[in-house]
Image (tube, helix red, strand yellow):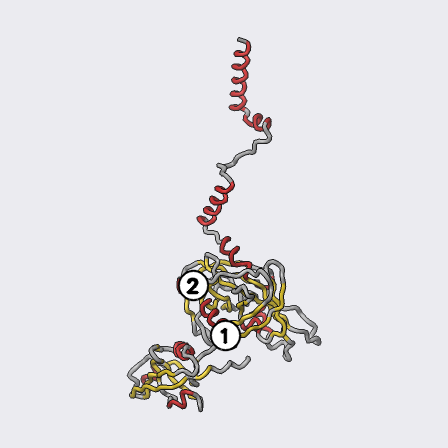
């Protein structure tokens, strides 16, 4: 009887304490943690966290996949004779540099970015990052440094290929530009202003941007992901962390990002890299002509029956076009089977023809339609600027 009464009183006391003073019971059992939400096993918790991260629109996984393969590129160049003449150009591409005494002529150092695309140590970067460099150093995100050798450059697309010799290199996965659409999320990864590796996000603002006057051959991906000086040669990746472009230029009035950046599509960059590795130069066709837009005023003045095509304003003596009989004033409307409406399209169509190969030009000379056969030559290397 006494045990039953004591048990009843104890249970009643426990009920009163749990109802009125629950904190007293928690303090009496300090080993039990305070639970703020539902718990889950460790493996399940990780899977749930990953699902939550994907649901909330985070791109940390894409950044983790791509970032180790993005490197900083430091190019040392001999001092210029007129050190101040290219200061604005240097600051735009590489950011501000240290102030040296005017009487000293020290080597110039430019900073850009690069992307490791091969286990053999091949990197993609911009041609303007390493132009004229006498020494190129590459720094990985894991702290390793290596001197890079220059495999080759293609200033007309602003692509350069470097090579480093280090074991266990992280390699980025290549994406498909053909599947890229306006509005897709992209990340820009690089080393802007030498502050350290930085990831910015945005969307694809436009595709196939050309006639910007940046490169000879233009087919840019436009993005509003922040790209700043030092990002040149860095990676533009999709939401899975796959490389879709090489960041190359920005539109800016101040030198900083205004939300208009341009990247070279990865298919263009890899084609240039393969040509440089195989031939030491990019194989492009050339016929030796100067081009102009066919304006409505010109077509009306010469009473041309067409308003689309490319006007030949000049023909280089002894060039393939001159030898085939092309004359200034001719209007080219087709190269082979490719119809052309602008100088950029004609330039692209001719460059796609392998050197020493034959093709046909469909053109208009006044009211006369002509088909001219010619053999294209290798496009000359552009002169350094």
Specify the quadrant that holds the C terminus. Answer: bottom right
Label 1 residue SS:
helix
Residue at 52% across, 58% down: 66
Residue 110 % position (x, y)? 61, 70
- Using the image, determine if residue 258 lies above or below residue 280: above
Residue 115 % position (x, y)? 53, 64
Q: Residue under circle 2?
A: 176
- Using the image, determine if residue 258 lies above or below residue 287: above
Residue 353 % position (x, y)? 41, 79
Residue at 62% across, 59% down: 143
The image quarter containing residue 338 is bottom left
Q: Is residue 55 left or right of residue 383?
A: left
Q: Residue under circle 1?
A: 278
Residue 360 % position (x, y)? 35, 83
Ranked by sequence position, the earlier of labels 2 and 1 is: 2
- Neighbor class of circle 1 (other Cα within 10 Å; few <14, some 14-19, many 20+) is few
In this orientation, which residue lies closer to the viewer: 37 or 244?
244
The image quarter containing residue 255 is bottom right
Q: CA distance from mark 2 to mark 1?
A: 23 Å
């Amino acid at each position: 009887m006494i045990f039953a009464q004591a048990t009843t009183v104890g249970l009643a006391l426990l009920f009163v304490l749990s109802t009125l003073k629950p904190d007293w019971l928690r303090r009496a059992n300090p080993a039990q943690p305070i639970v703020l939400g539902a718990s889950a096993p460790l493996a399940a918790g990780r899977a749930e966290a990953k699902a939550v991260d994907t649901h909330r629109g985070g791109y940390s996984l894409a950044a983790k996949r791509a970032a180790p393969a993005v490197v900083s590129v430091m190019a040392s160049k001999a001092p210029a004779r007129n050190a101040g003449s290219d200061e604005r150009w240097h600051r735009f591409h590489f950011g501000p540099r240290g102030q040296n005494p005017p009487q000293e002529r020290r080597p110039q150092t430019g900073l850009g970015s690069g992307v490791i695309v091969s286990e053999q140590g091949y990197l993609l970067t911009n041609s303007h990052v390493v132009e004229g460099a006498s020494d190129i150093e590459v720094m990985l995100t894991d702290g390793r440094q290596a001197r890079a050798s220059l495999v080759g450059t293609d200033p007309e697309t602003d692509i350069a290929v470097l090579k480093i010799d280090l074991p266990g290199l992280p390699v980025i996965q290549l994406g498909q530009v053909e599947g890229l659409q306006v509005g897709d999320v992209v990340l820009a990864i690089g080393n802007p202003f030498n502050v350290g590796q930085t990831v910015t996000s945005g969307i694809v603002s436009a595709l196939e941007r050309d006639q910007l006057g940046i490169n000879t051959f233009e087919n840019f991906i436009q993005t509003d992901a922040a790209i700043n000086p030092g990002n040149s040669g860095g990676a533009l990746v999709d939401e899975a962390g796959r490389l879709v472009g090489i960041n190359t230029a920005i539109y800016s009035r101040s030198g900083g990002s205004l939300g208009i950046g341009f990247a070279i599509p990865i298919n263009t960059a890899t084609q240039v890299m393969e040509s440089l590795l195989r031939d030491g130069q990019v194989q492009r066709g050339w016929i030796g002509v100067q081009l102009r837009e066919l304006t409505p005023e010109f077509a009306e003045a010469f009473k041309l029956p067409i308003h689309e095509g490319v006007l030949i304003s000049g023909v280089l003596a002894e060039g393939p076009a001159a030898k085939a009989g092309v004359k200034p004033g001719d209007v080219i409307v087709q190269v082979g089977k490719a119809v052309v409406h602008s100088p950029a399209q004609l330039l692209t169509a001719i460059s796609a023809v392998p050197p020493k190969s034959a093709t046909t030009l469909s053109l208009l000379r006044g009211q006369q339609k002509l088909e001219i056969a010619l053999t294209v030559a290798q496009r000359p290397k552009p002169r350094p600027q």
